[in-house]
Image (spheres, helix red, strand yellow):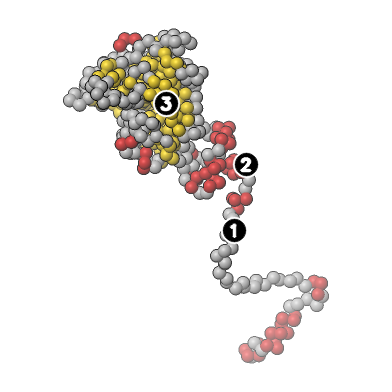
Amino acid sequence: MAAESCHPRGLSWFARSCIPADPARHTAVPVPVPVPFSVPDAEDPEPEPPIAGLPDELLLEILARVPRASLPPLPAVCRRFASLLASQAFLQLRRASGRLRPCLLAVSSSSARALLLHLHASASASASASSLEVSALPLPPRCGGAAFAHARAVAVGRHVYLVGRGATLRVDPLTGAARACAATLFPRSKFAAAAVGARIYVSGGSARTAAVEEYDPAADAWRVVAEAPRRRYGCAGAGAGGVFYVAGGVAVSGGGAAGTAALEAHACAGSVDALHVGSGARAWARPRAVPGGGCVVGACGAGDGHLYVVASHAVDLSFWRWHGGGGRGGGGWVALEAPPVPRGAVGLGVAVRVAMAGVGADRVAAVVNVAAVRGHAAAGGAVEGLVLVYDIGGGRWSRAPDLPPGFRRAACAAVEC
């Protein structure tokens, strides 16, 4: 009986009994037909991914909402991503959505690392410290080395330019993308650098020239625009109100062409030279020296158009604002609250370095480093990466968490990130 049940005639009758007599009531069931495998032609273009069909406006909206920590690898996805991330529309959308904040960029040339310090204003006026969010920024290995050992960081637009000895690097703080730019015409070390408008100015750091160089980011070119009154070494630079300030250091004379006198250094630690470049006239002025015989160890311009300097007086620090005035040498110094460094940290036999930057329109950030001079011992111990924030409106300093080790010679610049 088993054999009869499997007879083809019986199966045929069973199949006919399952099919409705009315053809109109018949429902066709699709049966998948296997497609033979074939190797695609190498000349046929690969199908584009779905995201390639999105318009730029929609893709920009998506990229503008990506967390900052996830932005660095995106320019390598495709050229379209790289172009959109570098556009001004991307910045505008990110700013409109509240994802851009004033912050401080600290770059360590010894380890080719960078940190973004998001400094928040205190919620209460009586708060003693500002909160700090630190996020790492990957940088290419060429950011390290001797060429950037004493580099200066200058922010122009969305980019930060690291100006070193015979090398210049442009870094995008949002993505970490970096590219080499034209080097200064003269090799410099421990020089003054600052941005005035959309140009970068450098002075000092060389015993062979007193030339002041101007860098045009659009043309990627340096040119000499003036001669400084003094050849300074170990000076600080700042830009505010259309003026390029060169402060502190020592004045070097002699040692130029062959046959000239030997090099001589004269202290000009508290003096300031000011080059007016906003009007294009490039006229020099000499503001009065910092009162009290202080040695300028840090300087920066702020959003209020004023110059701020930190001066060392052998055993303590002072903080000053130069309110300009309008004429040549006009204006005067205003004493402000001194930076709150640890007791005994500043004294004889120590070297003080302060990297400063105006953060936003109402704050000044200072990174203080104190190290013992060779052959001496620091009474209060070394201070490395001490971050202080000055509230211009409130007239008070607050202390933020210190930078991690390895940032003693960090170059700092204020950016929007």
- Give the Cα distance between marks 1 and 3: 53 Å
- Label 3's element? strand
Q: Nearer the viewer, residue 308 or 365?
A: 308
User: Who comes first in sequence, dot 3 or dot 2?
Assistant: 2
Indicate the quadrant containing the N terminus: top left, top right, bottom left or bottom right: bottom right
Which amino acid type is marked by label 1? Pro
Q: What is the x, y in percent for residue 55?
A: 63, 45
Taking the spot 74% from the left edge, 78% from the top edge, the residue there is 18
Q: Nearer the viewer, residue 2 or 44?
A: 44
- Tag 2 residue: 57
- Label 1's element? loop
Which amino acid type is marked by label 2? Glu
User: Who comes first in sequence, dot 1 or dot 3?
Assistant: 1
Which amino acid type is marked by label 3? Val
Foreground mark, 3 or 2, reads 3
Taking the spot 40% from the left edge, 30% from the top edge, the residue there is 153
Residue 226, quarter of the rendered image: top left
Q: What is the x, y in percent for residue 79?
A: 53, 47
- Tag 1 residue: 47
